[in-house]
Amino acid sequence: MQDQYLLENRAGDAPVLETSAASPAHLTRLKRVRWREWPIEMLLFGAAGFSILINVGIVGTLIYESLVFFRHVSLWDFLTDPLWTPLFADPHYGILPLLCGTVMTSLIALAVAVPVGTIIALYLSEFASPWVREAIKPVLELLSAVPTVVFGYFALLFMTPLLQKFIPDLPGFNMLSAGLVMGIMIIPYVSSLSEDAMQAVPMLLREGAYACGANRLTTALRVVFPAALSGIGASYILAISRAVGETMIVAVAAGMQPNLTWNPLKGAATVTAYIVQVSLGDLPHGSIGYQTIFAAGLALFLLTLVFNILGHLLRRRFREVY
Amino acid sequence: MREMDSYIARSLWQDRMFACLGVLCTVFGLAALCALLVKLALDGASRIDWQFFFSYPSRHASRAGILSAWVGTLVVMSVTFCTAIPLGIAAGIYLEEYARKNWLTHIIEVNIANLAGVPSIIFGLMALGLLVYLLHLGQSVLAAGLTLGFLVLPIVIVATREALRAIPTEIREASYALGASKWQTVWHHLLPYASGGIATGVIIAMSRAIGETAPLITIGALTFIAFLPPSPVSPSPPFLSLDWLHSAFTVLPIQMFNWVSRPQQEFHLNAAATGLVLIVFTLSLNALAIIIRYRMRRRIKW
């Protein structure tokens, strides 16, 4: 009951003042103060509302430029043509090769980040001492603070030569090494968020499991993991959305040749790498080549939007449970 | 009884095995970080000297330097700082202290959550269409700084909100009880208490912006820049000039990308040295944020 009161109190306009039995003069003074502070509130509101403007700007730009593009290219060709050669003499505008590159590199990254990140989260949350947890977590998070272009360098000049020792005919640009390094980059997204979700599981559940004779491992896998599942799922989805939108690692290490292949040992361009490639050249504003990057960007935006909404729904469920 | 013992022994063994696996995975993550740092240091350390910091890029790898890149990073960051910090903190204060629970607030929150999830390169496309061509800012420091400012805005907002939320309601009520208005409460009581948390968020946001490459490539940042933006102060009137806002620029990550995508090995060494400078920048900023957070947690106990 008291909490309810406090919540209402914070949401409104300092209602504490109104409940006091005040003289009319006192009330007019209060009103004047509130009126004087009105511009401040509007200014703050404007700052908060600015985020809407940015979103409108993003969606507006993407749709506006893509509409011009889709006047030249039919949506059907865009989605089904197996070739992406917009800058050639015989242009083809099929997004499939770029999507294929994006999906392949993301899958490789997730194959690294999801198991490793989940095990780290389970270990830090259920096995490690609080001291170890507090020390390791920020250091691991540094992995996601490293600039992505540095990871690109690492993938091209460390991971690829390393892999070439095991796979001799691996080309210099390949999806495998880009994907692996991307996976390393997104480990902290999975591990930190999953660990937060596991920490939010009430101690009672663990104590119940221990009382039934379960060991730590069984408790972690059968009690804590399912209880924190929606939070863990949200962390996976954030990882997917990061992997799909990641640009510099793939642009440096996976090559920029659109390639409709499911072979991770080959090089291929992703949607993001294509945008970078076009931006590096000198395409005149308004040409069809210029508009292709907005069409590709729109596809990317919609893809990440789906994952963001999914993640948002999962997080909301996670909040409702506890 | 013996069955019981063997069950317990097996349970403990399982626990120990999984703990080993956990340590292994954690070490894998840490080892990757170390390998990255060591690789950069081994490749790049030999190129780091005064000449490297104070030369312009060049066709000759051994004579090339990062003067225009680090100056560019500095000026772009100053624009980003001036955009993201005031906007982000103000938005955070509004959402946490002023906003009523209605549909408008909900829309704003959804928008911010969406901004946080949009890939950085999409911000670049938005900036290309909107800032560069529609608002005629050109491929300038101003356009780049604004783009990065928008990109890190959600980080600052979320950090501000979390810092404010951690302050107990009693502080606010005490302030109101003494007759303070809403803004007086925010300005004199809440912001000082939240400053540590906000500072942490700001530092994280800036470290993210420093390393960001993709959106700046998208707006068409040139990679070969052998000049500096015009100085903001001049000896003759009007003494201050804003011409530097409209100057072309390059930044450290773009310079690094340019060098790493060349086939010659010598340029890769330059790239490594640039990466080393970049990573020292970002990691020390992050370390600073961790230290602030740690000290804050020890000092403030509600």
Image (spheres, coloured by chain):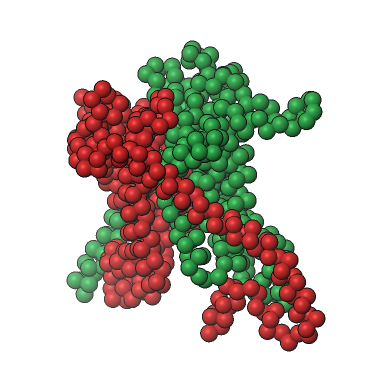
Chain colours: A red, B green
In this view, which residue lies farthest toward the top? B60
Q: Does residue A234 appear left or right of residue B113 in this picture?
A: left
In the visual, does A298 lie left or right of A5? left
Q: Residue at x 65, y 63 (%)?
A: A41
Is residue A209 shown above or below A61?
Answer: below
Towards the viewer: A150 or B221? B221
Q: Give the x, y percent position of residue B182.
A: 68, 69
Inspect this view and state whether residue B160 appears: no
Q: Is residue B105 left or right of residue A41?
A: left
Residue B91 to residue B123: above or below: below
The front one of A191 and B166 is: B166
| Residue appearing at x 43%, y 30% in the figure | A285
- Residue A85 appears at what percent x and percent y? 26, 29
Residue A210 is situated, as x and y percent measured from the top left of the image, at: 32, 72
- The image quarter containing residue B51 is top right
Residue at 29% x, 29% y is: A86
* Image x and y of residue B169, in percent: 62, 73
Furthest toward the front, the residue is A71
Task: Look at the image and tell me in which quarter the C terminus of chain A lies.
Answer: bottom left
Count of marks placed on residues: 0
Which residue is found at the position 75% from the left and 72% from the top?
A32
Regarding residue A67, the answer to whether it shows in the image is yes
